[in-house]
Amino acid sequence: MPRLVSHPDEVKIVTKRFGQGAANIDRYIELGGYESAKKCLEQGADWIINEMKTSNLRGRGGAGFPTGMKWSFVPKQSQKPKYVLVNGDESEPGTCKDHLIFLHDPHSVIEGTIIAGLAIGSKLGFIYLRGEYRYLLEIMEKAVADAYAKGFLGKNIFGSDTEFQIITQSGAGAYEVGEESALMESLEGKRGVPRIKPPFPAVVGLYGGPTVINNAETIATVPHVIAMGGEAYAAVGSPRNGGTRLFGVSGHVERPGVYELPMGYNLKKIIFDVAGGVRGGRKLKAVVPGGSSTPVLLPEEIETLGMDFDQVGKAGSMLGSGGVVVIDDQTCIVEFALRTISFYQHESCGWCIPCREGTDWLKKSLTRFHAGFGSAKDIDNIQYLAENMLGRTFCPLGDAAAMPTLGFVKKFRKEFEDHLNGKPCPFAKHVELSVV
Amino acid sequence: MSVETMSIFSPQLAARLDALVAKYPVRRSALVPMLLYAQDEVGYLSDAVITEVASRIGITELDVRNVATYYSMLRFKPAGRFNVQVCTNISCMLRGGYDIFDRFQDELGIGHKGVTPDALFSLEEVECIGACCWAPAIQVNYDFHDDLTPDRVPAILDQYRAQAKSEGKADHA
């Protein structure tokens, strides 16, 4: 069972029911659950979307798109049925927040899905979990069945004449399916390759119908936004970045864990106060701020850095999925870069050539380089390859592979050079990686 | 040919798959979970599984294979009864994921994608399993084990050996 952590600086909104038995529907109701959905049923779509816009809630999957605006793009009138999709294909290395949401508060996901459905005029929502999360899927399935039994889902939700159904779905192992259009393909029973955009999912999505797709954390946040009111929720965060974020702090820290902190909270404090500092009294070498696809930051870059989409963007990286991966001074950055690119090479679906070939060549180059057989030219070549992947693929996986690689090469060039001329890697134990 | 009378699956699984295809607006949406559930029972996607799934969904076997080969959890060869999946991605790597993987290799005498001669265990190095804050972590079939040290590896294996003994060998296809 994943360990829960706590820190006085936390502002528990999304996590406030964690560890309180809220997977039980009666307990969830006792803790105020499903009141937001009832309120939304009374207030109607325009009111919901307005609250969401006011809240400044931005997509927790990584892109940070304003949720209220996303919902408002769905056409009011549609020949085809509209759908709500919850993306629980959590696979970005460094990210395990949705894991805890499904485990501790599955009804918040259901309630958020209902509210999204009311906002866009949809009668059917899907909750898609990665295949590895079987025990969490079983928790979600039980929660959905309980919600049906209470009449919160079905033909007449909460005794109204409004219909809303939810279907849970299991993936079967694929990072790429976390990309919205690939997830729709997977849900349609196909290979999870991305679709070309436009048209965007809000217009042509699942089964060709207008579709809203949100990250599980975003959806689980929605009932809280409604309960607090959009304005109060926005006030918790920083400008244009409403509320809190579930930061998953992992790697070389004393107290790894998922911490819920206000948007804009200082990254240095996350590492040194909240997570207890670098493990074993070592020094901080670097930090990956928002999941493996976000460019690495140096200690001097995080002194005053507030963790919101805009500030981290300005610092040359991304807030991403909120997965803070902390790296100490005994770590080989070349090996870290190689492990990162090995992942993307493994997960590239092969649909777009720059990504398929680029990740493969980057892995080959970095493998050779780390083994001590690289040449000075390779460093520039790695950079050249990565730069030529940027913006040239249907989905962001190509960028997700190229951006961190560029960060490592640019910020740790000297460490790459230290691997030249047959010099053995000063840190690494594992020169060859067996994931293929 | 009726799928129901020809099914290679247990009556429980067959009933579950009947319900699965009925729940979606489009039948084919059942394909990915159906393959996984079938694999859970049979152990891998045998030719017979592919044939029955194709018939249940109403698409060609080629179509089924085309989709199945995309997903990393789906396999076309039997794994061990307990498939040990060791995450070595960044968060696990930083906290000793490779030491865990090495220890499993030593204890089981097999490498990546290997199966023990008694078919009790198989071993895989896998990508991120969503347990980064409790790293290093592994999954044995669908069970998570986290905050691991190499010293805990033998006890984990013993736990599954004991489970196999208590369940008997007959119930695994």
Image: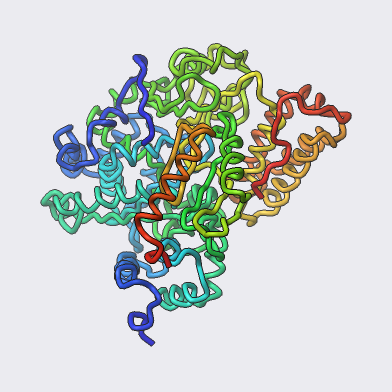
- Residue A240 shown left or right of residue A425 in the figure: left
Q: Position of residue B115 (x, y in %)?
A: 57, 56
Q: Is residue A203 above or below residue B146?
A: below
Image quarter where the N terminus of chain A lies is top left
Q: How is the image coloured?
A: rainbow
Residue in the picture at 62% in, 13% down: A300
- Residue A141 shown left or right of residue B135 in the figure: left
Q: Position of residue B57 (x, y in %)?
A: 41, 73
The one nearer the camera, A291 or A211, is A291
The one nearer the camera, A413 or A364, is A364
Number of callouts in the render?
Answer: 0
Residue in the picture at 48% in, 22% down: A307
Quadrant of the image occupied by residue A414: top right
Residue sitting at the far left: A159
User: Can residue A158 be seen from the camera position used here?
Assistant: yes
Residue in the picture at 37% in, 81% down: B3
Residue in the picture at 11% in, 51% down: A159
Q: Is residue A349 above or below residue A343?
A: below
- Residue B137 shown left or right of residue A1 in the figure: right
Q: Is residue A83 above or below residue A292?
A: below
User: Can residue A306 be seen from the camera position used here?
Assistant: no
The one nearer the camera, A309 or A129, is A129
Q: Position of residue B160 (x, y in %)?
A: 43, 49
Q: Position of residue A149 (x, y in %)?
A: 15, 53
